[in-house]
Image (spheres, rainbow, N blue to C red):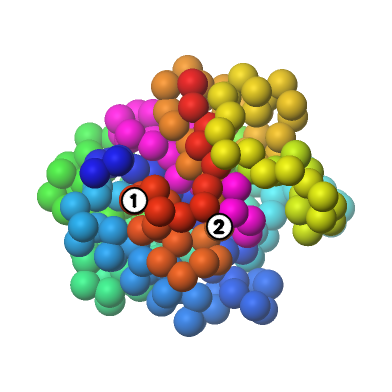
Amino acid sequence: MRFKRVLIKLSGEALAGPGGSGLHGETLTSIASDIASAAHAGHEIAIVVGGGNFFRGVQGLSKGLDRPTADSIGMLGTVMNALALEHAIDAAGVPARAMSAVPMPSLCESYARKRALDHLAHGKVVVMGGGTGNPYFTTDTGAALRAAELSCHALLKGTNVDGVYTADPKKYPDATRYDHLTHDEAINRDLKVMDTTAFALAREAGLTVVVFSVLDASAIGAALSGTGRSTLVTP
């Protein structure tokens, strides 16, 4: 097994399906099934989910909100996605627990490192919402933070393209795809697949980052086994 314990970063947009916003039932079910298959194969799985399918903090700035308020609204969107994923993974036959960095005890568990580790050790998928619980930090940074403190062997970053490119391949067809990068190279070349703070955290923790397309069928299982197309970003 290439990676035993992993953290998967899913964007909110990945759950929106073709509609581009909100939740798409078939997409949610497909991703949950992929996660359940990976758990059945013996992987310990934690997930950090974004909230861009409901609200992105940066959007609030154009609506007259200040950054802390806008980011707080975005955090609520990530918790909604965490609850949806918890239910979908449970329905796929694997126990899941939603945890929030922003305490919401009537909805889900509050995030605590030791409790999350206990869930992982007992075969549960841990789905984390609420980002870091603080404004000004992206969910990518939250994913790197949680992956480090949960002693994950890799951080899987699911995107809408099959790796890291020199530029957006949807806008620039001649963009070159990388098979392998170091964290320093990703930072110095200002590659936008994750923000600089997230890459810096991953570098300090010695985390391998696997960038892959979450849109492909069984994409998560393929990324974990090394059979799918992806870019490895290593220390």
Q: CA distance from mark 1 to mark 2?
A: 14 Å
Taking depth in this image into account, of 9 and 110 the one nearest to the observer is 9
Give above or below for 18 relative to 158.
below
Number of callouts: 2
Image quarter of residue 149: top left
Q: Is residue 40 visible?
A: yes
**Tag 1 near tag 2, CB within 8 Å:** no
* Residue beneath the point at 49% across and 27% down: 234
Give amino acid for label 1: Ser
* Residue beneath the point at 39% across and 37% down: 154
Q: Which residue is mark 2?
A: 213
Give amino acid for label 2: Ser
Q: Judge depth for marks 1 and 2 and give the one in front.
A: 1
Q: Which residue is mark 1?
A: 225
Dot 2 alpha-carbon crowd within 10 angstroms: few under 14, some 14 to 19, many 20 or more:
many
Residue 150 lies in the magenta-colored region: yes
Q: Secondary structure at mark 1?
A: helix
Give above or below for 124 relative to 196.
below
Give above or below for 134 relative to 49.
above
Taking depth in this image into account, of 63 and 46 the one nearest to the observer is 46
Mark 1 and mark 2 lie on one chain; the one further toward the N terminus is 2
Is 6 placed left or right of 209 in the picture? left
Query: Residue 81: x and y, percent?
Result: 48, 63
Quarter of the figure that contains the N terminus: top left
Q: Is residue 136 visible?
A: no
For the record, the magenta segment spans 144-163
* Residue beneath the point at 59% across and 54% down: 162
Residue 136 lies in the magenta-colored region: no
Query: Residue 7: x and y, percent?
Result: 38, 44
Query: Residue 45: x and y, percent?
Result: 30, 50
Is 39 placed left or right of 199 in the picture? left
